[in-house]
Amino acid sequence: MAADAEKPIPLATYRVQLRAEFGFDRTAGIADYMARLGVSHLYASPYMKARPGSTHGYDIVDHNALNPELGSEESFHGMVEALKRNGLGQILDFVPNHMGVGGSDNGWWLDVLEWGPDSPYAGYFDIEWEPDRRYLHGKVLVPLLGDQFGAVLESGGLELRFDKETGGFAVWAYDTHKLPIRPADYGTILGDDQPDLERIGDAFRHLDQVRPHQIRRANALKAELAALVSEKADVAEAVERRLKRFRGEEGEPESWRRLTDLIAAQNWRAAYFKVAADDINYRRFFNINELAGLRMEERELFDVAHRLAFKLVDDGTLDGLRIDHIDGLYDPRGYCERLAEATERPFYLVVEKILARHERLREDWPIDGTTGYEFANLMGGLFVDPRGEEAFTRLYADFTGRRESFDEVVRTSKIRIMDSEMSSELHVLARQASRIARANPRTADFTANILHQALKETIARFPVYRTYVDWRGVSELDRRSIDWAITQARKADPNTDGSAYDFLHRLLTTDLVAQPRSGYSRQQVLRFAMRFQQYSGPVMAKGLEDTAFYRYNRLAALNEVGGHPEHFGVGTANFHNANAERAARWPHAMLGSTTHDTKRGEDTRARLYALSEMPEEWERQIQTWSRLLRARRGDVEGTAPPDRNDEYLFYQLLVGAWPAELTGADPASLDPQAMTEFAERLAGAMTKSMREAKVHSTWAAPDEAYESAMTSFVHDALDVTRSNAFFDAFLPFQERLARIGMVNGLTQTLLKLTSPGVPDIYQGCELWNFSLVDPDNRRPVDYDARRRLLDEVEGAAIGSLLSRWQDGAVKLSLTRRALALRTAMPDLFAKGEYLPLEATGERAEHVVAFARRLGDDTVVVAAPRLVGALGETPDWGDTSVPLPRGQRWRNALTDGTLEAADAVTAADLFRDFPVALLVREG
């Protein structure tokens, strides 16, 4: 990388989820809107070629081609030019950890299936070619069948076909998944019935004789076969006759013998998708069979996979990369170092990394920071009242009957994942550990079973997603995490010999090979420690985010990516400390509030935070709602499904996501169609929640009866076609909560746009975002409506928009004005110091304030928190906020001026608008 070039740091970014319906052309069409809003960069979802029909772009099949479903190369360049015309740069979400497999689109994967370990791409994927399962030696398990292999075979779900264009044979599953036949078996298919086919089939049978050029020879033979079929009708007819020999009759198992035998000889083994949990022999993205892990630590693969991305950086198309799932990589630090050295032009680099509460981002990584999950949860904690925790915990336990601690829920959820969906990977680790143990007589008796148990208990208690042991050794941070996990596992597992945990500790810290002549292979020990890290992260993600977060519903707003549901609230001192640390260490980290991964939109959470201030009232409300709705369904005893935990979550989603335009509505005015559409959204979110929780239903084995009961409950609650007493009880409470949530939403918007870092606006979130878990948060955005509102707010006093807060114009105006100030004072927000301002007076705890200062320039940010206790017309009493040096201040939001030397009262600050953004003018 050129040392004298300046890295382009974004002022603010705007995330767009590209998809077939909103591709390059549509994105180009909003470039002027993004510029008017005040951001500096488009932050684009992955747009390299993905599986057909992809709705998110993370199932990439070719890193060096654009996704044709998003538009042509011409339309891509049109988007780039539109961005540049409007002064916008571009950040790309890049996916290095995995690729989409299955289907018929990933050329590398298809080549591996065809040639097995001999494929030049076999080393690109993390495949175990010699697993314990002997039937998989030299093969890749392909768990894509919806039923047992024999049932799919006999129903005609697997069919041998010939490709007339390429001259290749493949078995197709469900007309969708291509499974190439080994060229060495083409002779078996072609037979000796026709002279030309006999001759070419014989050549295919003897490909081994031309090693190491067998692939090149096979391609030449395929081309010859394709030409013969094209030119000679008798050859084409003979091929079709041969194919028919591999088709059987339904209900006659023996008639499928030829196809069964042919499949058995291949480099792949097609299987029922549920087999993956036990027998998978390639690393996946979490437990998703269709996403295969890549060995990005291999230099050749790194260079190939990043060729297009680096070209776009060097030619100025891209100013930065957001790296997806950095923890999935074998060597994250090494990967980031390669990135930093790879281009002539410096670029902005952030990584998707989830940090534990006590964890800090590694300062030896050459990056600009994370994508901001920790900031979203830090900021959200400001609106959670810790004084309500005890009452909230009690009401949750009383209503649902669940009294497990969150830590216990996480532990059991992680074990559930290791025992089921990711058991195969754990067995592999245990076998590898036992092989290492057998290398030394002192540890030779540690069996795979003993180490399997120790590994499982250790991972179940691991305090972070992963450690970062690498070829350079183990850091003290990582050693502390390993020490803690081993200690906790040893205490909880008295039945396993403690010496097994001693061995595992030395293995994970690489202390086994700290001294010469240890009796162990340094390569094997380090490789095991690094492979362990690639497993602990997915287990944490699936156990915590995708299981425990759906089981423990005390306050759903806290169940967020990177969140800590057991931690109830963040004080202003903690908020300031974290902001100051970011300003000092990671001043350009991304700041997020909603992303494509968040489980609830930012304004949904803003409402739910307010529940923490009113536990007693919340309890009265849900008890009333439950009695009304269950009585309406004839469930007076309250014992019919859904269970009380799912019911409790539903009430939170209902108040959190209730459409703003319906807030304050009369029950009689509710539109049936709108209610049905809202009910469908809620039912979809609840279905996903139930399956992720894995208590009553799962993705692999949905319980249709239970899910139907939940869906029916949702629709009953929102049925306005008949008398519904529920709405009489629900709507007044929802209206009150929504108004508190509105103020919370304005506060978190201002804090994000002014705190140290680079704020990101998720598509459409410049207006209210009351979304639920994906795919609900990827619904289409109405940019025509946003353009019209932007026209309105540019000429309107922001305070006047409060009376119509439901349309989101007030949030849009705040966003526009705050971004305009960032544009006017870029150095202050990028480099300025962070000064906490501690409010004083009787309502001091309800104010969060800070200043940003650079030279003579100073900006003061002040906003209310825990506003539920303040009422609709707050009496601030003697509460005031200290001011840095200055006499005259302008409010960048209201355009009002303020004469104040040392402090300003909260009453003056918030008289015309709920939040304040002051600029020093004298």
Image (cartoon, rainbow, N blue to C red):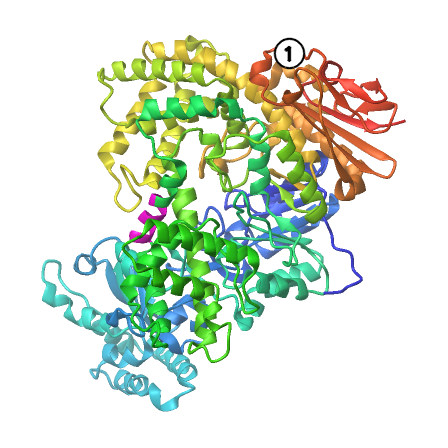
In the image, residue 667 above or below residue 497: above
Q: Residue at x 35, y 79 (%)?
A: 225
Q: Is 418 a magenta residue?
A: yes
For numbered disc 1, what is the local secondary structure?
loop
Q: Say whether residue 67 is visible.
A: no
On-image quarter of the C terminus: top right
User: Amino acid under label 1?
Assistant: Pro
Give how far across and how far down residue 274 sits, in percent.
26, 54
In this rendering, position of residue 634 left or right of residue 908: left
Say how many tags the image has: 1
Give how far across and how far down residue 904 sits, in percent.
78, 19
On-image quarter of the N terminus: bottom right
Q: Say whether residue 646 is visible.
A: yes
Q: Residue furthest bottom?
A: 209
Give how far across and how far down residue 229 sits, in percent.
33, 76
Q: Residue furthest right?
A: 922
In this rendering, position of residue 334 left or right of residue 586: left
Q: Which residues are magenta?
A: 412-421
Q: Nearer the viewer, residue 468 or 272?
A: 468
Q: Is 371 a magenta residue?
A: no
In this rendering, position of residue 6 left or right of residue 803: right
Q: State the image quarter where residue 345 is shown.
A: bottom right
In the image, residue 568 above or below residue 433: above
Q: Nearer the viewer, residue 325 or 172?
A: 325
Q: Residue at x 28, y 33 (%)?
A: 707
Question: Please, what is the dominant secondary structure of the magenta stretch?
Answer: helix
| Residue position for label 1 | 874
Q: Nearer the viewer, residue 680 or 554?
A: 554
Give how far across and how far down residue 183 sits, in percent.
33, 78
Q: Residue at x 37, y 45 (%)?
A: 411
